[in-house]
Amino acid sequence: MINIFFAFIIVTALAAIVLGVRCTLHMFQQSSYQYSSYWRYMKTHPVMTLLPLLGVIPLAGCFWRDKTLAAVSVILGWDWLFLLLLLMLYWPRAAKKKLVVTARVKRLIAATAALYIVIFLAAALPAGFSWWLLLGTLLAGAMVSPYMVLLANLINRPIEKGINRYYIRDARRMLKACPDLKIIGITGSYGKTSVKYYLHTLLSARYDVLMTPESFNTPMGVVKTIRGSLKATHEIFLCEMGARHVGDIREICEIVDPQIGVITSLGYQHLETFKTLDHIVGTKKELFDALPAGGPRFVNGDNEFVKQYELNRDAVTYGLEEGNAYRACDLEYSEKGSHFWVQAPDGAREEFTTRLLGEHNVVNITGAIAVAHELGIPLDKLKIPVRRLEGAPHRLQPIVRGNTIIIDDAYNSNPGGAHMALKTLGMFQGVRVLVTPGMVELGEQEDHYNHAFGREATRYCDYIVLVGHRQTESIQKGVLETDFDRERLYVAEDLQDAMKYVYGIVTNQKLIVLLENDLPDNYL
């Protein structure tokens, strides 16, 4: 009977190791394989860190000498209970973004398996094989499975760097084979993806255009786009450039060598890694520093930090304010879209209509019009493409469902973007509902900006639905400091619970729901 129970526990231990490795791989992938981001996840989920350490007690029992039958039963019982706890801890749950088994993940799995084999052999060879040694090693392996993945990633780092260098060289080779290709770099704290999408539509009226898809704005995302999609017929490459650390934009510029640069905005985003606004501005400015002498540069002339740091000097400016080279004026908004005029520096003036919502979208469209016009497309030839513009996914994307309009602004919210989203919500007539888990990656300023977000939301919203208790505490405080009706503030367990509450709101009016930000699983 003991032997059967022994074998059953060993199988359970193997399952705990497999699930522990899988869970860690999932969260590590969502942390972009960055140790700093993963440590933040572990700090905010202490049970994932502390519970496995309880295995020290049953582990010690495996190496207790002179075990009686009763002691063996107690030790095996404790081992089994501990392993059941680990299985419950690591058991796969419903996730917004599932683990993607990429080539890198496969290499991590192989390296992790090799580490386990090496450790077992190192323990077994000197002492000789025994079932207790096997069980003890497996218990220890289950305890440290998160750290084994991190160690495997460290071991694999030279391999990953070598693979990346090969891909980068190949992408550069492909770009050199297209000497007439115009490469436009687009960056900014927010708005860069929208401007990229708008530019793609406008420029496609005359040119064969390639753009980085979705949010492929990392060095390897750009490289993947080039290697997988670049053709000899392409005339323009729109390269979105994202950054979380100083030097990230420079790294992408060294790959693609842009000739034209667009900075859509500057603001507080990714403060968790950048630390200061100076670092954010300096990193975005790396795009302009990489341009050839006389290379056209475009900036949002309305942005306060663009003006403060004088990035508008020697640049083509666009926006709503007077003094911009390309200025949108006579704006009219409705639930159906926006109507405005654009004045160009060459004296041209044209009327535009778009289905897109919000003042910030007019600014972004004006930026795209500025680039397209400077590349030789007359303003009047841009009217139809502007009318056809579709919003970038999850960037104030309106979705109509019967009497409900959902404004999907779920992509990586920041203080500036959240402010614009609330203003857009305020344009609508009906019962206005905010659904949000708050903003993240703002470092020491996170509570401050979420608190201010909560206070501002009360000016535009009839209902406020917060997703998750822990990360929305600062928003709650901001809301409760106002005279907002507490009965209309709801804190949901998850997005499903939040939407159940929203659809339970009884009203004869239109229901307007703003989905502001959607945190990945490693933030929940």
Image (cartoon, helix red, strand yellow):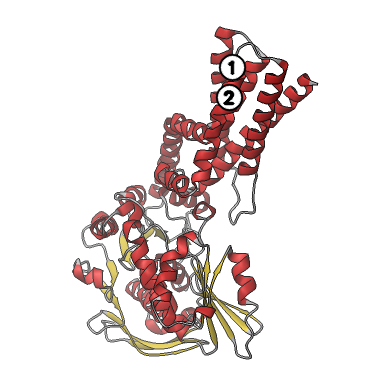
The image quarter containing residue 55 is top right
Q: Position of residue 491 (x, y in %)?
A: 54, 69
Residue 357 position in % (x across, y down): 47, 81
In depth, the one of 336 and 235 nearer the eye is 336
Q: CA distance from mark 1 to mark 2?
A: 7 Å
Looking at the picture, does residue 504 appear above or below residue 17? below
Report if residue 365 is visible in the image.
Answer: no
Residue drawn where x is 46% and y is 87% of the image: 427
Which residue is depicted at the point 53% across and 24% down? 115
Give above or below for 118 relative to 161: above
93 above or below 119?
below
Q: Are marks 1 and 2 in contact (CB under 8 Å)?
A: yes
If the image is split into quadrants, where does the N terminus sit?
A: top right
Q: Which mark is residue 488?
A: none
Q: Amino acid at mark 1?
A: Phe
The amino acid type found where label 2 is placed reads Leu
Question: Dot 1: few (<14), some (14–19), or many (≥20) neighbours within 10 Å?
Answer: few
- Where residue 153 appears, as percent x and y from the top left, is 47, 34
41 sits to left or right of 430: left
Q: Few, some or many C-alpha atoms within 10 Å of disc 2 (few <14, some 14-19, many ≥20)?
A: many
- Of 366 and 411, the residue lying toward us: 411
Residue at 54% from the left image edge and 54% from the top image edge: 521
Residue 343 image-quadrant placement: bottom left
> Tag 1, which secondary structure?
loop
Please state the horizontal and vertical placement of residue 346, each as a whole percent of the image. Answer: 26, 82
At x 64% / y 11%, what residue is drawn?
66
Q: Nearer the viewer, residue 353 or 90?
A: 90
Judge whether 145 appears above or below 281 on screen.
above
Tell me the number on the disc at residue 63: 1
Q: Which residue is nearer to you in this view: 262 or 237?
A: 262
Determine which residue is flagged by label 2. Answer: 59
